[in-house]
Image (cartoon, rainbow, N blue to C red):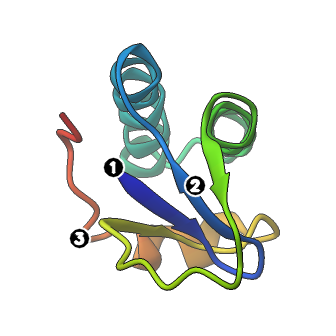
């Protein structure tokens, strides 16, 4: 799966990393649904860290369509509630 982090670039995430990401982003979506700002912030940091750490960065010179687009790392809770509104629950 190709994932774009806005303002940062694209990463290829696959295999166990994608399964782990799916579990982490469920926590993020649950935090948004429950109105838990602290859990959202922690979960979003974990999601971004997994993508950066276990994904393969795609060079900026390479044109690849993104399967999923995440908001910028500095997206706050209120912005995220709207941006993640149509985010898929199941990534795998």
Using the image, determine if residue 20 lies above or below residue 8. above
Using the image, determine if residue 4 lies above or below residue 55. below
Q: Are marks 2 and 3 in contact (CB under 8 Å)?
A: no
Mark seen at residue 1: 1
Element carrying mark 3: loop
Mark seen at residue 86: 3
- Rendered location of residue 76, percent (x, y): 73, 69
User: Camera-side residue: 10 or 81?
Assistant: 10
Q: In the rendered image, which residue does mark 2 sit on?
A: 11
Label 1 neighbourhood size at 10 Å, few (<14), some (14-19), many (20+)?
Answer: some
Q: Quadrant of residue 16?
A: top left
User: Camera-side residue: 29 or 18?
Assistant: 18
In the rendered structure, which disc, 2 or 3, sits on the residue that comes first in sequence?
2
Q: Quadrant of residue 26?
A: top left
Closer mark to the observer between disc 1 and disc 3: 1
Q: Label 2, label 3: how many angstroms apart (C-alpha)?
A: 21 Å
């Amino acid at each position: 799966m190709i994932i774009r982090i806005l303002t940062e670039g694209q990463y290829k995430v696959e295999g166990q990393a994608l399964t782990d990401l799916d579990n982490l982003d469920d926590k993020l979506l649950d935090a948004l649904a429950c109105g838990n700002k602290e859990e959202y912030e922690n979960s979003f940091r974990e999601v971004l860290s997994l993508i950066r750490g276990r994904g393969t960065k795609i060079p900026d010179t390479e044109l690849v369509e993104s399967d999923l687009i995440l908001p910028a790392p500095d997206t706050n809770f209120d912005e995220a509630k709207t941006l993640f509104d149509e985010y898929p629950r199941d990534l795998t």
